Image: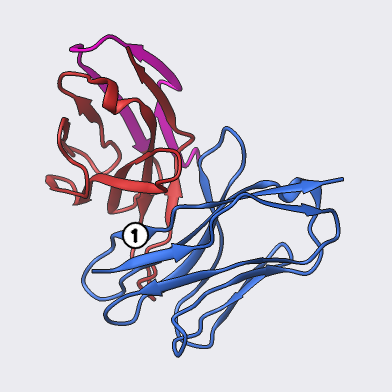
């Protein structure tokens, strides 16, 4: 079945450090890939998405590239801020006939001033 | 637009009690889902609906009931609460759009404690 695996946290970084959160997936067909972010006490919100191979999703300085050959969708940011502290979820949804979204376990990021 | 709204925000139940978690969306989305979030386990799908009158089970449906009589509302019923149902519950809606990406729009969540 479909699945998403992302690196375990927590990840602790100093402000302005480079961030990478790894995500790999298993899926049949051609899924869309997402990163969602959850700030403390809130629901998840979409951070970025990519719908086909080699697409790069980007938002708020974060970016991720859909790599079909390595089945990966790693999240990166060049310079993190304290306000980026949150839990990040990698997710996929099948594009053909179904809409169910499969989520990874989430990676908590702490950014220190 | 209010987006996806959930009530209540917090709830404490005793074992065996029943209750309904409310969810509504005003975006005319055809798809709605209920997830539970537990530490270290990400989000797990409880039930989902692809339109009014159509519901189906997700990954962890036992102990929960849903119905969808309108496009806007998708309540989740706990039939007889158990401590294992202590969790944070999220309702989400989505639509297929032209590219069929199904990105999800989440409510703020309900934190449920069963004692």
Residue A86: x and y in percent read 64, 46
Quick one: which chain is blue?
A: A
Label 1: element kind = strand
The relative height of residue B35 versus residue A50 in the rendered view (above or below) is above
Residue B97: x and y in percent read 37, 68
- For the point 52% across and 74% down, the residue is A73
Query: Is B38 positioned to the left or the right of A36 in the image?
Result: left
- For the point 35% across and 60% down, the residue is A102
Query: Is A75 positioned to the left or the right of B49 in the image?
Result: right
Q: Quadrant of the C terminus of chain A?
A: top right
Instruction: Tell me which corner region of the image, top left, top right, bottom left or bottom right, holds residue A78.
Output: bottom right
The relative height of residue A57 versus residue B82 in the rendered view (above or below) is below
> Dot 1 falls on which chain?
A
The region drawn magenta spans B1-24
Instruction: Tell me which corner region of the image, top left, top right, bottom left or bottom right, holds residue A17.
Output: bottom right
**Residue B6: within the magenta?**
yes
**Residue B23: within the magenta?**
yes
Crowding near pointer 1: few (<14 within 10 Å), some, many (20+)? many
Residue B28: x and y in percent read 34, 49
Quick one: which chain is red?
A: B
Instruction: Tell me which corner region of the image, top left, top right, bottom left or bottom right, holds residue A4.
Output: bottom left
- Front one among A100 and B85: B85
Query: Is A55 positioned to the left or the right of B92 in the image?
Result: right
Q: Quadrant of the N terminus of chain A?
A: bottom left
The residue that mark 1 highlights is A101
- For the point 54% across and 50% down, the residue is A45
- For the point 43% across and 33% down, the residue is B5
């Amino acid at each position: 079945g479909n699945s998403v695996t992302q690196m375990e946290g927590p990840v602790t970084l100093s402000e302005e450090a480079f961030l990478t959160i790894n995500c790999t997936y298993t899926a049949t067909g051609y899924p869309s890939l997402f990163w969602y972010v959850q700030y403390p006490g809130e629901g998840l919100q979409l951070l970025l998405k990519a719908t086909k191979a080699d697409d790069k999703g980007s938002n708020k300085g974060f970016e991720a590239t859909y790599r079909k050959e390595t089945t990966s969708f790693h999240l990166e940011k060049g310079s993190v801020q304290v306000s980026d502290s949150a839990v990040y979820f990698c997710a996929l949804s099948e594009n053909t006939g179904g809409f169910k979204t499969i989520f990874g376990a989430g990676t908590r990021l702490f950014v220190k001033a | 637009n209010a987006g996806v709204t959930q009530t209540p925000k917090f709830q404490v139940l005793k074992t065996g009690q029943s209750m309904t978690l409310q969810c509504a969306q005003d975006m005319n989305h055809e798809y709605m889902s209920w997830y539970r979030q537990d530490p270290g386990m990400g989000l797990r799908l409880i039930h989902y609906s692809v339109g009014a009158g159509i519901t189906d089970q997700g990954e962890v449906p036992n102990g929960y009931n849903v119905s969808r009589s309108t496009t806007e509302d998708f309540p989740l019923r706990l039939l007889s609460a158990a401590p294992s149902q202590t969790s944070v519950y999220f309702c989400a809606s989505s639509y297929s759009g032209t590219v069929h990406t199904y990105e999800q729009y989440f409510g703020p969540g309900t934190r449920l404690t069963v004692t």
